[in-house]
Amino acid sequence: MKPIILLLATFLFIPFLHAQNYDESKVGKYTLPDVLTTASGKKITTKREWEQARRPEILRLFEEHVYGQFPKKYDRLEYTIKNENKQAMNGKDHLKEVELTVYNNSKPVRINVVLFVPTNAKGPVPAFLLVNNRSRRNTAPTRDTLREFWPAELVIDAGYAVAAFYNSDLAPDNKNTYQNGVLQLYPEQIGAENGMKAIGAWAWGASRVMEYFEKD
């Protein structure tokens, strides 16, 4: 099974150390850069130019000014199937509870993933991946608590796979403790002015989960 992944991202705001401004009239004058013009002033006219020149520039701007750096290197990724039920949801889906362990600099971080795949799937299916920033009950594999926050049954009935992991496995949603997670693998990011913070850690985890899907 190699599901094609469609990642749904929920963007949350983390307070900065200085006061926030919510008054539009106090925003200084600025001009947003042209998406199809490089930093050197070259106009982008082809897909190749976009992929090789402009897109990397924009990603670097987001790393520098919005979400922080995004480390790509790690030593290895291992996964263990902790529980499996091929007849979950009254036989509609194949459930896997998977523990991913990612190592870097001899330190591990563990991501617990709940994955449902339609049992009648004839081949790879698209999948929705949720970063659960609420109670673990919302994505419990037993489905003893059904909430609209994660309508897994509707997704399965529509023929898609659906998966979720808990955001605190990567970084607590707390300005004082967010570094107690994946950032232990990248300590140099903690003190960096544009280092990875909680949102970046959650995205990093989602990328590792998608790499697991490719191996499943």
Image (cartoon, rainbow, N blue to C red):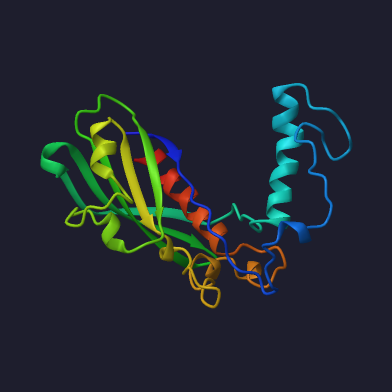
The residue drawn where x is 37% and y is 37% is: 127
Give the image quarter of residue 124.
top left
Q: Quadrant of the C terminus?
A: top left
**Horizontal arrangement in the rendering, residue 196 relative to residue 96 (left or right):** right
Q: Is residue 17 above or below residue 200?
A: below
Q: Residue furthest top?
A: 46
Q: Position of residue 56 (x, y in %)?
A: 72, 41
The residue drawn where x is 33% and y is 51% is: 149
**Horizontal arrangement in the rendering, residue 181 relative to residue 63 (left or right):** left
Q: Examine the rendering and report whether any part of residue 87 can be seen.
A: no
Q: Residue furthest left?
A: 90
Q: Quadrant of the N terminus?
A: top left
Q: Position of residue 100 (x, y in %)?
A: 37, 56
**Horizontal arrangement in the rendering, residue 204 relative to residue 189 (left or right):** left
**Horizontal arrangement in the rendering, residue 145 relative to residue 216 (left or right):** left
Q: Position of residue 13 (x, y in %)?
A: 57, 61
The residue drawn where x is 39% and y is 49% is: 130
The residue closer to the viewer here, 161 or 106, is 161
Q: Residue furthest bottom?
A: 176
The residue closer to the viewer here, 98 or 120, is 120
